[in-house]
Amino acid sequence: MKSLIKDPSLYKKGLEQIYWAERSMPVLLKIRERFSKEKPLKNVKIGAVLHVTKETAVLIRTLVAGGAEVHLAGSNPLSTQDDVAAALASEGVYVCAWRGQSSEEYWSCIDNVIKSSPEIVVDDGADLHGRIHMKHPDLGRKIFGGTEETTTGVIRLRAMEREGVLLYPVIAVNNAQTKYLFDNRYGTGQSTIDGILRATNILLAGKTVVVAGYGWVGRGIAMRLRGMGARVVIVEPDPIKALEAYMDGYYVTSMSKAAEIGDIFITATGNIDVIRKEHMLKMKDGAILANAGHFNVEVSVEDLERIAVRKRVIREYVTEYTLEDGRRLYLLAEGRLVNLVAAEGHPSEVMDMSFANQALSIEYIFINRDRLEKKVYNVPDEIDRNVALLKLEALGVEIERLTDRQIKYLNQWAEGT
Ligand code: ADE
């Protein structure tokens, strides 16, 4: 199969980008070193649907070093880094991805991955898993297993497991502690702000920023916004998380109330219609709307289109919608993941751990392919802890070791006051 990318001549720039990412991904490079020697994925065909970024390239190179044949498509129509796609294609990876795809083009690239008859599938958002289950169940029954990178994808896979329709085992990479505690929190926290600033170049100090969702992503964003002097308002329907947000010192309220006071709105919920017409109609002139969740459903673009009398793109990734009474709302990145569309996604340092979990989970699936059931599994604890240890080692951090007496104390119940 031939690669389908924007411009093969961009490969040199892409190779430099990958080189830059590799400098900050020591854990994955260490895994690659072992994979190069042991070839644990020799002749395994891997189908991957991931954001095609310089960090993803480092993962793909690692899988190839382990002996795999990789077919890659993008996991969002607007997130592909075309130079990186060209670089990977120049190295013999089958890539079907370019920035600015239509919905049909996006799905046709996922179909290309499916046509390669992968034995292991790697997904970010579960569009690949969903498509295999809905349209290619025969292929699904032959697949050794899959992995899933993100919260939204894991939610969809758990629904499939509950309904008893899952056709192969899946490892929820998202749920590794060395993934969500760092990637979801610090990765999204920083890269979402990066995307908003690159798109708008606004000052955050003194702005009222409404963050919808207080999961790991929302709290990362809130924490970093506070650090830059914004007044942060949290909208969260879960009572426990809402209480946490309150005691973390944020102003907590409903979207209906927040709509009236926010200068900037950021959605990070994984849910649909979080910001809709009734909220938009209450917003201040100049309010900025951005999404950090996986799909472009959190801000209802449909509602925005319906209530606007005029729409124009005023800067790259900034669309101005003028309402009937003259107020203007600004939607960033068409309501898609602002960090990957308007910036470069998470920094390499955190993707190092996320993708180390991916590489080791893929190897685990292949080794245990005859033993695993059609279930959603967590990343094995040994892998999670090993990734943390390797990262600490690479960072030069020495951690405390328990004495034998301490270990014994923690394992007994008789000794007290
Ligand atoms: N998801 C978020 N940031 C990413 C990145 N830099 N590469 C791949 N997937 C991502």
Image: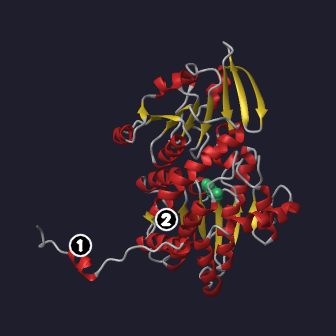
Q: Which residue is mark 1?
A: 410
Task: Specify the quadrant of the image occupied by residue 162.
Answer: bottom left
Q: Quadrant of the N terminus?
A: bottom right
Above or below, comparing residue 367 to residue 124 in the picture: below
Taking depth in this image into account, of 46 and 345 the one nearest to the observer is 345
Label 1 or label 2, whichever lies nearer to me, is: 1
Task: Specify the quadrant of the image occupied by residue 324.
Answer: top right
- The residue sitting at the top extreme is 325
Image position, residue 124 (x, y; %): 59, 56
Residue 156 in view, yes or no: yes
Above or below, comparing residue 112 to residue 22 in the picture: above
Q: Is residue 377 left or right of residue 31?
A: left
Earlier-in-chain disc, 1 versus 2 = 2
Residue 115 in view, yes or no: no
Residue located 76% across and 59% down the image: 96
Residue 171 is tagged as 2
Taking depth in this image into account, of 284 and 370 the one nearest to the observer is 284
Q: Secondary structure at mark 2?
A: strand
Taking depth in this image into account, of 307 and 120 the one nearest to the observer is 307
Question: Does the residue tagged 2 have its C-beta within 8 Å of any atom of ligand 1?
Answer: no
- The residue sitting at the right extreme is 9
Q: At label 1, which amino acid type do we have?
A: Leu
